[in-house]
Amino acid sequence: QVQLVESGGGLVQPGGSLRLSCAASGSMFNAMGWYRQAPGKERELVARITSGGITNYADRVKGRFTISRDNAKNTVYLQMNSLKPEDTAVYYCNVARVIAGWVTVTEYWGQGTQVTVSS
């Protein structure tokens, strides 16, 4: 059974930083990443990374967010810098088995962690 344990969300002022972590157990996945969903909006990709280190970022977070993973710990991280109020959302960890072109074969979701950017 796959379990995902997320941590690191919270309240931060604009311009601040947060680091999210997601530890997976029960299986290995070649893709790990983060999605987010703001109130009244659809869930959207933030960033994802393969076991080989290939990354994919949403345009609106490029240059501010960095995704990384520790394959030995089966854990993915999201370092979020220069946070903006529009980054406020519930952030969901996603782990998946993907094939070429990021086509998802199997995926699992975490329970979500709230990130609020406000002064």
Image (cartoon, rainbow, N blue to C red):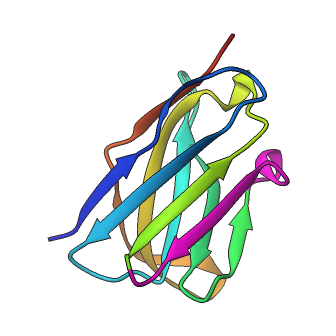
Q: Is residue 66 magenta?
A: yes
44 with respect to 57 (left or right):
left
Q: Which of the pair 53/37 is nearer the observer? A: 53
- State yes or no: residue 51 in magenta: no
In this view of the protein, can residue 43 be seen by the observer? no
Can you say whether 69 is above or below 85 in the image?
below
Residue 59 vertical placement versus 9 (above, below):
below
User: Which corner quadrant of the image does residue 105 belong to?
Assistant: bottom left
Quarter of the rendering occupied by the N terminus: bottom left
Q: Which percent across, then down, holds residue 77?
A: 53, 60
Q: Residue furthest left?
A: 1
Residue at 67%, 32% (x, y): give it. Answer: 87
Give coordinates of residue 70: x percent, y percent. 49, 76
Magenta residue span: 58-72
Using the rendered image of the protein, determine whether residue 6 is visible from the camera's viewpoint.
Answer: yes
Q: 98 or 111: nearer the eye?
A: 111
| Vertical placement of residue 4 versus 98, above or below | above
Name the foreground residue: 37 vs 65: 65
Residue 17: x percent and y percent?
A: 67, 37
**Image spot of residue 63 (x, y percent):** 85, 53
Image position of 42 with respect to 109: above or below: above
What residue is at 69 percent from the left and 10 percent from the top? Answer: 119
